[in-house]
Image: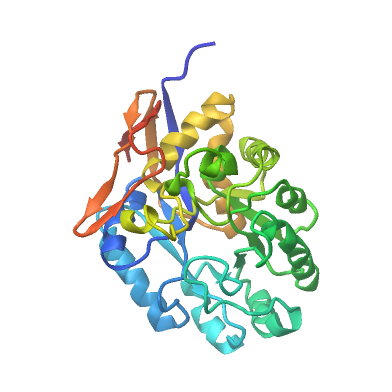
Amino acid sequence: MEEISTFEIHEPLDMHLHLRDGDMLSLVGPLTSQTFSGALIMPNLVPPITTKEALLAYKERINEACYKDKFEPLVTLFFKNDYTYEFLNDIKDQIIGIKLYPAGVTTNSETGVSSMDIEVLRPTLESMSKLGIPLCIHGETNGFVMDREKEFMPIYESLAVAFPKLKIIMEHITTKDAIELLDKYDNLYATVTMHHLLITLDDVAGGMLKPHLFCKPIAKRPEDRTALLSAALKAHPKLMFGSDSAPHPKHKKESCGCAAGVFTSPIALQVLTQLFEKHGCLDNLNKFISLNAQKIYNLNLAKKTIKLIKKDFVVPTAYEYKNESVIPMYAGEIISWSIMSIN
């Protein structure tokens, strides 16, 4: 078989991304917009995005940071129990979905929902269902850290049954239980990160602690990684790439109380190409990183082609802007694919 030396990705999409704000946005925004056609942007700023004015202002700041590139920020609202039908109807054309965080489960989620009781959530969820607004969920309980996603599975099931017309996305899934649930309900979908396809908890804390691999949801067991990777390599039609690339300043990662988040945006396409090639599944990469999301979210984005070449790429040890310094996954290591051109 002839060795593949180049590969093209068309309209790549990152369906779960943290861009932060201020100087951090100015640093990390272009590291996504350069190579991606669009990205679903998380709303957990401080304060979170809960109004139309805040949403439009944030989208404008993203566009200003990414002005050099052909890139569509797909913005979201931070879930609240009391959004009215009138408010959501007015804003629905400006958002791609609404992100629900259980209170306190991850970065800047303190004002998330304190109860996952369906009747408490019903007012907003019924309006979303009627208006066709997708619900994106950080699906974890406050239980034992390795079991939090598994414990959340019954909640996904209850929501899928109670709101059958509501499109529900299980964000950044990390377990084989979540993969199995995908095929059980028509209205359940999921995103998976690059790092959860590659690492287990052993990579994070099995030897010396690696703070730049520490994330939430925490990396799980080998059998979970195997299930996630198998579904991604097959381009399961209900599974999308969502990096959950979550930048934190170096001093907040390399410190007591290490912040949770893995920064992967600048290397995502190169690493995924390397991974899918390794397993002989390059033919499925465009589905996983673009076509599945386009179908699930009914997207029609401007054409953008990323051409990669089989050539070693050394990952920078850090990305810096003004007073911000962020360490990427695989800092200083070599990836076997590089970006050749962007059109």
254 to the left or right of 222: left
What x and y, as percent, mark residue 49?
44, 77
48 in relation to 34, above or below: below
Image quadrant occupied by the N terminus: top right
What x and y, as percent, mark residue 332?
33, 34
Q: Quadrant of residue 252?
A: bottom left
Q: Residue furthest left?
A: 322
Pick the front one: 237 or 253: 253
120 to the left or right of 20: right
Q: Residue at x 49, y 36 (%)?
A: 272
239 in relation to 17, above or below: above
Q: Quadrant of residue 297?
A: bottom right
Q: Residue at x 75, y 72 (%)?
A: 163
* Residue 200 visible in the shown view: no
211 to the left or right of 276: left
Pick the front one: 164 or 41: 41
What x and y, as percent, mark residue 281?
59, 29
* Residue 318 visible in the shown view: yes
Q: Residue at x 49, y 50 (%)?
A: 214
Pick the front one: 75 or 250: 250
Coloring applied to the structure: rainbow
What x and y, as percent, mark residue 51?
45, 83
Q: Quadrant of residue 83?
A: bottom right
153 to the left or right of 287: right
